[in-house]
Image (tube, rainbow, N blue to C red):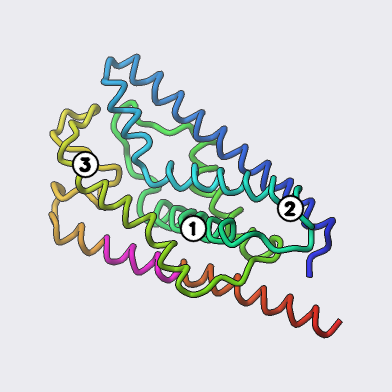
Amino acid sequence: MRSPAFTTTWSILRLVMGLVIVAAVVTQLVASVATTVELGRDLGTVIANFFSFFTILSNVLAASVLLWAGIDARRRDRTAVESPALATALACATTAMIITGIVYNLLLRGITLPQGSEPVPWSNEVLHLIGPLFLLLDLLFGPRRRDLPWRSVLVVLAFPLVWVTYTLLRGPLVTNPATGDPWWYPYPFLNPNNPGGWPSVLVYIAGISIAFVAVGAFTVWIGRRRAAAAESVTITS
């Protein structure tokens, strides 16, 4: 079982990481807005597109949950587990961030972006690498997680399913501000206008869905395993 001092220290790390993620998101947004104004593109569309990236949404979720968890730990008994709502939110944020890190570093890192879409280097690394790694470490080594039921995996899946539905419905309704194409998709593997068309898109969606189920189940399993281990230590002591 983690000591109260450890829980206090980790809660501070959660607060710091949450603020770093917020700073990274805001920095990238400011840079995107400045480039948009400079190039004379439609500002409203660019901002809406910015908050349509799964990376941005997952990082906003992660920052919100980390700040919530950090503040919550300061208010309650340091040896107590988090509420069911916070535990579920942590599982959702952790799964989303791990998937963000995997997908970006395996599929998207190194892809050339349209002029004016270049990421801020340090912000990009926080959003795609440092943030996901912290959430993984938080899952494995942070304060004890609540023993969530397996059906929580379905809650974890709700966020990406809503996002991909929104993305595919919105895509053909938006003109790409960088290229002028009569569509806009946040990631090339979700664009049915690319070679491969819809079959390729559906294959990627199926693959990523399987990945979400696997990572979500892993996240819940780790929480259950750590809860059981903590209970056994409590009983033997």
Looking at the rendered structure, the kind of residue marked 2 is: Trp
For residue 105, above or below residue 21:
below
Give the spatial CA distance, label 3 vs label 2. Answer: 39 Å
Most foreground residue, 22 or 113: 22
Where in the figure is residue 201, as x and y percent of width and height? Answer: 20, 57
Where in the figure is residue 72, as x and y percent of width and height? Answer: 69, 49
Q: Residue at x 61, y 42 (%)?
A: 18
Q: Which residue is label 3 attached to?
A: 170
Using a 10 Å C-alpha cutoff, classify the residue at mark 1 as few (fewer than 14 neighbours), some (14 to 19) or many (20 or more): many
Q: Which residues are magenta?
A: 205-215
Looking at the rendered structure, the kind of residue marked 3 is: Arg
**Which structural element holds mark 2?**
helix
Q: Which residue is label 1 attached to?
A: 92
Task: Tell me which numbered mark, 2 or 1, is placed earlier along the sequence.
Answer: 2
Q: Residue at x 24, y 42 (%)?
A: 185
As for residue 80 lying within the magenta part, the answer is: no
